[in-house]
Image (cartoon, coloured by chain):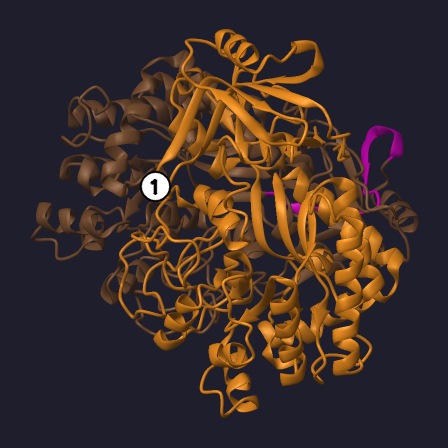
Chain colours: A orange, B brown
Amino acid sequence: MEAQSKPPRRRSLMLGNFVHSETREQLGFLLDAAIAVDERGKIVDMDNGSDDVKTAKKQLLCRLGWDEHDLDVYACRRGQFFFPGFVDTHVHAAQYPIVGVFGETSLLDWLDKHVFPCEQRFADDKVARQVYTACVRRTLAHGTTTAAYYATTHVAATKSLADICLGLGQRAFIGRVCMDRDLGPAALRDPSTRESLERSDEVTRYINGRDAQDRLVRPILTPRFALSCTRKVMSGLDERHREHELPIQTHMSESPREVEDVARLYPEAGSYAKVYDEHGLLTASTILGHCIHLSEGEARLVGERRAKVSHCPCSNSALGSGEARPFDPGGGQAGGPRQQTPGDEGPGRGGAQTGQPLGRAGLVSGHERYLATRGGAKVVGLEHTVGGFQVGMDWDAQLVGLHVVGGGGEGEHKDSGNVDLFEWDLCNWKTIVAKWVYNGDDRNTKMVWVKGRRVHKR
Amino acid sequence: MEAQSKPPRRRSLMLGNFVHSETREQLGFLLDAAIAVDERGKIVDMDNGSDDVKTAKKQLLCRLGWDEHDLDVYACRRGQFFFPGFVDTHVHAAQYPIVGVFGETSLLDWLDKHVFPCEQRFADDKVARQVYTACVRRTLAHGTTTAAYYATTHVAATKSLADICLGLGQRAFIGRVCMDRDLGPAALRDPSTRESLERSDEVTRYINGRDAQDRLVRPILTPRFALSCTRKVMSGLDERHREHELPIQTHMSESPREVEDVARLYPEAGSYAKVYDEHGLLTASTILGHCIHLSEGEARLVGERRAKVSHCPCSNSALGSGEARPFDPGGGQAGGPRQQTPGDEGPGRGGAQTGQPLGRAGLVSGHERYLATRGGAKVVGLEHTVGGFQVGMDWDAQLVGLHVVGGGGEGEHKDSGNVDLFEWDLCNWKTIVAKWVYNGDDRNTKMVWVKGRRVHKR
């Protein structure tokens, strides 16, 4: 696994097959096509009308007046195609060491038993650099070109996360976690509301100073959740949101016990969603993690505010938190209560929110490709920049390579992964993509680019 | 990926850490231990009481009077442990080319649109050898030491599957699929009831002749399901079951439309389970695939007959077939309606069968390790032979290796997989196993043995 950034200031030409989501339902296939990426990392032209790649390439170079020798050229081989990079709208980078460790717990016990002890380690910046480097390399290797990260309360460690994303070339939103209430160990919490806000400001200034021009890495305001934040800190973050147009991320209604505790702590608010809304945190640039146990009124409020929802189905299923309400198959809007995030699998049968049997898994097969790219881009407010192959968008993409089984049924080499294509699959692009989505892993992600820079290769 | 069988007739000594399921709830850890495997592939002795591996080894060799130079010795390195091989109780080897291909279909459409066209290819034995070789290598590489396979109706292709398992060293039950009713394309079906039974007999004789001594590969009677089998063929298979003590595998109650169709086709039987029971197919050595939509009466009947259930949760979720009733946390019996298979994730909230909210995912975290080994072994009737590390059992095992992250957060090498252990994890075996189960893949399965023969290495 090589994960390093290259100097970005060179034009590239991408040749071969390009697959992306045109809508939630529809994949778009640009076959035997060519895409030109300029020195800023932007898609400046594409050719999709030629009979073969050679012609497409010639057409494009001719139109742009580009010289082939000044370019990096990447061409698909058999079983390969380009796909947009994934957008992960909710990643706890500091919990990377405990992925898969939850035992018999549910949310609040798990925080006490596993999460808080793990996050305390980040007081040591050496640990932070080790874990964050592993986490960013790993997510890049899986094709995640954009991530919205939660770090911890620690200032130095959070700055390190920003540095690492910048160094490795991942597009990222970096959140220093605010927690000024008495939940969790004192050593992890912010010692006061004032310091909580000051620490966040320090991280914001640092990140903006490091990457003012490209804005590859940006700060995001991160009140952990209503149980670990005071009213004052929430209002303070709202001021910063309005003044500096900073996005916000937090958790909401992940588990029933948490919802009860919020109702007890904020009895006058009327609902969990209203706690955030009262403090100005329910906005069109807010990412709400989980949102499983919402009343109809809360769902409506979230929709009215055009806040975004990141459902995190793997976490929900691991912790037994519940299943989120279904994806709205009719909707096509950015945001609203039904906007979902990459990999979401919908609620399955008997969704807790509607009380109605759904008959089928709530997420129609195939939609996950949209959610992982264009859907995620909407959630983080980058829908005009990443998530598809269009002139004017940035080249945030991955080269996917699948193994074609030989006549003897043998594997190609160690790193070829779990997707086996047979000769008869090769003309069927829907099958190829379906097999990749179901059986693929990081071994199939051969190269990754962010903003035109190649940031991973295997 | 190297998957080849080695001559079995050599003793082995396994040194290091051994993890297996003692009960559904409890993992057993044999740390710094040694296990001796004789030339038949049986565990003949073990040492788990010594302070270190060196002493354990010395003790064992001394007790057995074995000479180290006549042995193959395998020793765990840092981040490695031995784990029992997996038992997969329901694998359609002939559907290997369409894993992940289901689109917007549900069960019966999917059979028509994807499954039957794929299975027709197996009329060509060259295709069969190619696909079955890829499938058996792949499952071995993932640590599956025992598999209950469905082939197709084709005799030559089914014999090839048996040959390939035998050659590559996988323990397997090989089922030639019987389908003598007019469901599916004529070219795929058995032309008559008589031929359906004769073809199955031919495959049974072939397999028994090929592997009479070791019985690594065995025949299994395989009526596809009630909709593709006549009463006559079911009765014929029952005769063979009683006469030759052959096990049986079939599908039951996988989707609502299938259940309705069975009720229409067998109106006098009273239920799907009774259709099989009337024909003698509901036995203690029957594996029933899916069993999602059972009435209480049917579940009771299945339990009384001590038939085994293989739930196939990934398939169920992909096809939207439904979710099976929960695992019975109190039970510890082999078989019964609540016996489940590897990887099953239980029914989640609001299980359709009980109508009661379960509060948590039905399968308690950790149980999947049991189901994938000892539980699966019970389903295929091999609970005294495989599934755990005990004297008298066969050495069907895998060596698991996890990556330990360096100080700089860097990956070790291309093939190290997705599980990252940190230094502080290394003393915590529950964490190590949890991280493997959640994040691991075939890259973590470094070696695989069946009956003492090493059959895979990477």
**Amino acid type assigned to the residue bearing label 1 in the image:** Glu
Q: Quadrant of the N terminus of chain A?
A: top right
- Most foreground residue, B149 or B141: B141
Name the chain letter of the residue that bears numbered label 1: A
Residue A106: x, y in percent? Answer: 57, 72
Image quarter for residue A148?
A: bottom right
Residue in the picture at 33% in, 56% down: A328
Q: Nearer the viewer, residue B102 or B154?
A: B102
A454 vs B105, left or right, is right
* A433 falls in the magenta region: no
Image height of A397 relative to A330, above or below:
above
- Kind of element beneath mark 1: loop
Give the side of residue A394 with respect to residue B18, left or right: left
Q: Quadrant of residue A220?
A: bottom right
Q: Along the line of sight, which residue is nearer the eye, A369 or A249?
A: A249
The residue that mark 1 highlights is A25
- Residue A194 lies, in percent from the top left, at 77, 81
**Residue at the (32%, 16%) spot, across then down:** B123
Dot 1 crowding, Cα within 10 Å, few <14, some 14–19, many 20+: some
Where's the C terminus of chain A, which quadrant?
top right
Q: Is residue B212 visible?
A: no
Point out the stretch of residues depicted in magenta: B67-85
Q: Position of residue A361 (x, y in %)?
A: 35, 53
Residue A100 visible? The answer is yes
Which residue shows up at 48% across the image and 32% down it?
Answer: A390
